[in-house]
Image: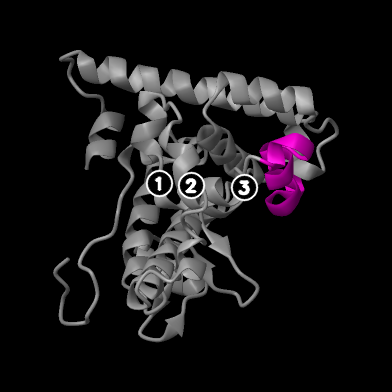
Amino acid sequence: MKKNSRNKAPAFQFYAADWLTDTSLRLVSAEARGVWIDLLCHAFLSPDPGFLIVAGQILDEKGIRTLSGLTPKRFKKVFHELTSFGIIKQDAAGRFYSKRMTEDAQLSRIRREAGSKGGNPNLIKKVAILDKQTDNQNQTPSSSSSSSSSISIIKKKYIKKEEFIFDHVFQKYIEENCPRIGSLKTQLTPEFCKRLEKEFDIEEVIMIFDQMENFSKLNKNYSSVYLTAKNWLIKRKENEKDIEKRNSKNTKPTFEDKLRDF
């Protein structure tokens, strides 16, 4: 890929299907989504890709407001939406960042290291644990079009044949990555795990777990991991079908459609 004078790739991967079907993004205003895509561009140009760092300065809330160009009142609403739905995150050092972009950057670093060492098996194993297993998996059109490198890392890390014997991948993933989901009243049983695995693609379920974990009102509004995940997955598929149906008809686009295509 051609690079600019700053020795940085001029573009980053943008997953259109994920953007249009992500539950958290659909729950915020169009203005918040517009601010977020601008912030993603700044995060990509950061010296530490994925983190909001400009000219060597870690941006705080005030700095982000300056970048957004919004009035304090409008920005307060937008920033609340982005943080409450877990779209923009903040690490222990106070840096605001994009989870997807930092994971993609980490994957790129691992691949570069593996390539520079001639395909060192110890490095390659981090990103290619289950190549043979995943080759024969059937994917739905929606899951194949919206799968990403970060989801692949998760899948390859947790989906190991032996783990299905004693500890299902869904239970293990929640235990290690989703404390908010782990505190819900009704947790996943092996039977619930099998039902989810039978009805949905594994990548889709893990993606929904991430969205549930990032939903600030999860513990207030929901009590069952299985029912919540299943309902969110069904709504996600329905949303994808609506988008496909709307795109298949030669109808006049709505204002919302124009914003998405902008």
Q: Is residue 67 visible?
A: no
Q: Quadrant of residue 248?
A: top left
> 10 Å neighbourhood of mark 1: few (<14), some, or many (≥20)?
some
Which numbered tag is attached to residue 148?
A: 1
* Residue displayed at 49% across by 72% down: 62
User: What secondary structure prevails in the magenta region?
Assistant: helix
Residue 51 position, x and y percent, is: 45, 70
- SS for callout 1: loop
The residues tagged by marks 3 and 2 sit, at their Cα atoms, a distance apart of 11 Å
- Tag nearer the camera, 1 or 3: 3
Which numbered tag is attached to residue 190?
A: none
The residues tagged by marks 1 and 3 sit, at their Cα atoms, a distance apart of 16 Å
Q: Is residue 169 magenta?
A: yes
Verify CB contact (< 8 Å) between mark 1 and mark 2. yes
Q: Quadrant of residue 21?
A: top left
User: Magenta region: which residues?
Assistant: 162-180
* Residue displayed at 52% across by 22% down: 235
Residue 183 position, x and y percent, is: 82, 43
Verify CB contact (< 8 Å) between mark 1 and mark 3. no
Which numbered tag is attached to residue 158?
A: 3
Verify CB contact (< 8 Å) between mark 3 and mark 2. no
* Residue displayed at 61% across by 69% down: 91
Q: Nearer the viewer, residue 95 or 69?
A: 95
Residue 84 position, x and y percent, is: 60, 50
Residue 229 position, x and y percent, is: 64, 29
Q: Earlier in the sequence, mark 3 or mark 2?
A: 2
Q: Amino acid at mark 1?
A: Ser
Which numbered tag is attached to residue 151?
A: 2
Q: Quadrant of the N terminus?
A: bottom left
Q: Amino acid at mark 2?
A: Ile
Residue 250 in the image: above or below residue 149: above
Q: Amino acid at mark 3?
A: Tyr
